[in-house]
Amino acid sequence: MRIAIASDHAAFALKAELAEALAEWGHDVVDLGPFSDARVDYPDFGYTLARAIATGDVERGVALCGSGIGISIAVNRDAACRAALVSDPYSATLAREHNDANVIAMGARLIGVDQAKACLEAFLTATFAGGRHEGRVAKLSHPTL
């Protein structure tokens, strides 16, 4: 699978660890930056990740910042993206099964490397259940307000 990964400075080290794990698991990793731990603004990298998902350049995305909150908000500004902020493998699984999430978001200051890898593995191995969830997921990209 072709997977983009992006972070801010607070999650730079976690991004490196997860990119390495993804490559070891056989995925084609697209590192969207940053490329050092110098201070950056998470929205810039969230928008870049969202663009990669929206254009179909990648199938999935990994969004990381200090809390995971800010970058997930940035990614979700694009209607093609369904970024889910997770902190455990079960929530990562449900994000795929019930919400057809195409981006996983995590907070580097809140989650350890081993837990982040477990979340990422759960996210990538789960599949969308469809059925009763399809209509709800459709509304995420096309609200009927």
Image (cartoon, rainbow, N blue to C red):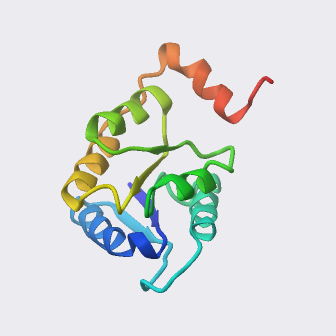
Q: Between 13 and 102, which is closer to the camera in this rendering?
A: 13
Location of the C terminus by quadrant is: top right
Q: Is residue 97 left or right of residue 139?
A: left
Q: Residue at x 26, y 61 (%)?
A: 26
Q: In which quadrant of the rendered view does residue 125 lie? A: top left
Position of residue 14 relative to residue 135, above or below, is below
Furthest-top residue in view? Answer: 132
Q: Is residue 139 left or right of residue 6?
A: right
Percent position of residue 130, x then y? 47, 21
Percent position of residue 103, x then y? 48, 49
Position of residue 41 relative to residue 65, above or below, is below
Q: Between 20 and 2, which is closer to the camera in this rendering?
A: 20
Q: Is residue 94 left or right of residue 133?
A: left
Q: Residue at x 38, y 54 (%)?
A: 1
Q: Residue at x 60, y 46 (%)?
A: 81
Q: In which quadrant of the rendered view does residue 74 lie? A: bottom right
Q: Residue at x 35, y 35 (%)?
A: 91
Q: Is residue 83 left or right of residue 10?
A: right
Position of residue 17 relative to residue 85, above or below, is below
